Image (cartoon, coloured by chain):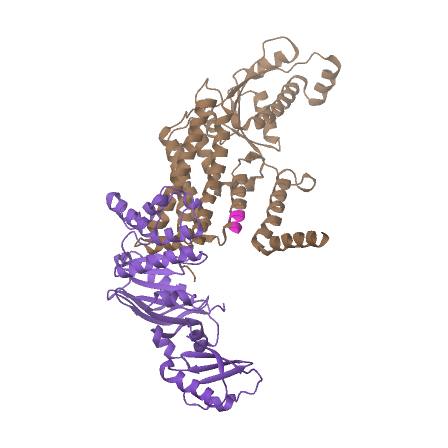
Amino acid sequence: MIIALRALVRKDLRLFFSDRRAVVMSFVAPILIGAFFGYIFGGLGGKAETSRIPVLVVDHDKSAISADIFSRLQGEKTLSVAASELDEARAAVKKGSASVAVVIPPGFGAQARSAFTSAAQKPEIGILYDPSHAAEQGMVQGMLAGTVMQAVGKAMFSGLSALLGRGAGGGGLAVPYRVNEEAVTARKGVPYNGYAHSFGGMGVQFILFMGIDAGVGMLLQRQRGLWRRFRAAPLSRSLLLGSRALSSALIAMLVLCTIFAFARVVFGVRIDGSLAGFAGVVIAFSLMTAAFGLLVAALGKTPDATRGLAIFVTLIMVMLGGAWVPSFIFPPWLQKITLIMPTRWAVDGLDAMVWRGLGFSDAVAPIAVLLLFAAIFGVLAVTRFRWEAEG
Amino acid sequence: MLEVRAVRKSYGNLVAVDGVSLRAGKGETIGLLGPNGAGKTTTVSMIAGLTRPDSGEVLIDGKALRGDTDPNKGKIGLVPQELALYDELGARENLQFFGALYDLDGAKAARAIDAALELVGLSDRSKDRVGTFSGGMKRRLNLAAALLHDPQILLLDEPTVGVDPQSRNAIFDNLETLKAQGKTLVYTTHYMEEAERLCDRLVVIDHGKVIADDTLHGLYALLPVTNMLVIELVRADGGFPVEQFRRLPEVKSAECSGAILRAGVHDLTSGAPPILQWLSDHGHPYHHVVSERPDLETVFLSLTGRSLRDS
């Protein structure tokens, strides 16, 4: 019995280590992904470069207090603060290029001073935020409260120490403003639907997995001799590869459309932006997925080893595309790198057309980038595809 | 007609096919015989247009095969060594798909599918999923898939691998029917009995080169002996005079082990009587005499010094 047990275990170990690619992936994938998350969540002693939340400040007050608030917010290490006009700020938040916009109303300074120590009516600061970045909005509001208290206190008591001394002793100080939060969605009054983003993100991830399956399927077909039969027919190589790409793209489109149809019926997700833009992003992403599948088939050797490697690459793309954790927590350099990830453009494109309610012009860039990726993957696949059956 | 002119193919430093030439006429069946790795499949791949030769050319009806979309490829049907079928689909669905690769559609496709299924005896299973088929049935469907576009030339790359004797015979019957229809068959195998049964001519390949190309009888003639007389002697005392026996002009080779004497002769009709007479005259009576015909295994061994089954 011991001999049999030893032989069975030894056999499994030998088989495991006989596939070098699979072995490398088994070790490399968890190390790389673990290192990545460790880095973005602080690294060794939290010394990693931190990202900054993009915040716009619309100052309609133009008072010393509002200027001080702006200045103090700019001093926050975790924020990247810029001044803006209201329309620009709203558009930026809607597009997702800014996470939060702080709107300081006219007369804020004077009203805040009064409200600081009395029951006078509190002025209202507008907070426009990207609902897909709700966590960032909470962080910004917390910092805003601190800076407003400091700015107003400084104006009233000529210094933070005096404020703290009197505040601690008197107990009559109050937060001198109210907040009017507004999630910037497609239109005013349209609530943010969290399913819209999650269905887009997960759709992108699983359609890429479908692309891998299509590529691995081609390798399996080659292994089973089906490609020998295809190639014996008087058909061009472009027709053979093109047909495969077309069928993959059609499946990808069908899957994405079904996902969003389900989200519409069950969760009320609406396409509030350009329908043509949505269709364009879906088509471009589907073509990119099809080309990705071809590339998997072109670069892969055995189906098993290829599947492991392709899944790893896809997970990295999805991870860097911001589907697992919001990309704002990435360090700035990494956020720039994510722009070369087709997944990022696909998710952003779908968000823009579905719940951000943007027009077709905002779909042009994602469509163009996804088509560019499709072209690059397609050219690589065609040039690297091993046509000749060795015998 | 198929003509292969000095095709060569190498993969890196490995020369898989080295100047192979062969011809096959209408209604002729030629066998590509050789051990595993001899270059048979690569040769078939080049004939089918799957692999581009480094040099040399393949001609169909006198026209060189050029490129993937050469219409002449439609004159060829390939039966791959692998079971190149979709297990998930039904037999008819598989054939519809493979027929469509040759622009077969509608009623024309239906007729071709019916005929192919009829030929391979799978008409009653046409709607069943291929995944439910036995290995032999899949092999027959694998053959049917290559027949839909009515090719003149059928390339059969070890089409009976892994099938039971009954299915093998069924496939042989199918191939004989196709041969009778005037199809040119190119049959690769390392089973000598298949080649002997089916092929008019045999091209023996080893290490990528043609080492013999002849009819079965022509190949046998290459052997030092074409028949072996196996004689069971009455006495098994070890005293048989082998050297003296070998000096007989009819005896081409001789071995004696115990009571069994093996004598190689070229022609049984003229060689056997004097040998048996000599045994009687010299006091070596015998119980039993049989003659053995050499087989392709012996031919291959004689030509290469290796067994056909060596890989």
- The chain drawn in brown is A
Display colour for chain B:
purple
Question: x%, y% of residue A230?
Answer: 35, 52
Q: How many marks?
A: 0
Outermost residue toward the top in this view: A119
Question: x%, y% of residue B198?
Answer: 35, 65
Q: Is residue A335 left or right of residue A261?
A: right
Magenta stretch encompasses residue A65: no
Above or below, comparing residue A356 to residue A334 in the picture: above
In which quadrant of the rendered image does the C terminus of chain A lie?
bottom left
Q: Observer-nearest residue: A59 or B173?
A: B173
* Residue at left offset 53%, top offset 48%: A309
Question: x%, y% of residue B286?
Answer: 49, 81
* Residue at left offset 47%, top offset 25%: A90
Q: Is residue B115 left or right of residue B134?
A: left
Main SS of the magenta part reads helix
Residue A361: name its quadrant.
top left
Above or below, comparing residue B28 to residue A78 in the picture: below
Outermost residue toward the right in this view: A169
Residue A364: name its quadrant.
top left
* Residue at left offset 40%, top offset 27%: A273
Q: Observer-nearest residue: A278 or A267?
A: A267
Question: x%, y% of residue A25?
Answer: 58, 49
Q: Observer-nearest residue: A70 or A332?
A: A332
Q: Observer-nearest residue: A204 or B250?
A: B250
Q: Which segment is the magenta one?
A: A304-309
Viewer can see residue A136: yes
Above or below, comparing residue A327 to residue A243 in the picture: above
Residue B41: name its quadrant.
bottom left
Viewer can see residue A292: no
Magenta stretch encompasses residue A305: yes
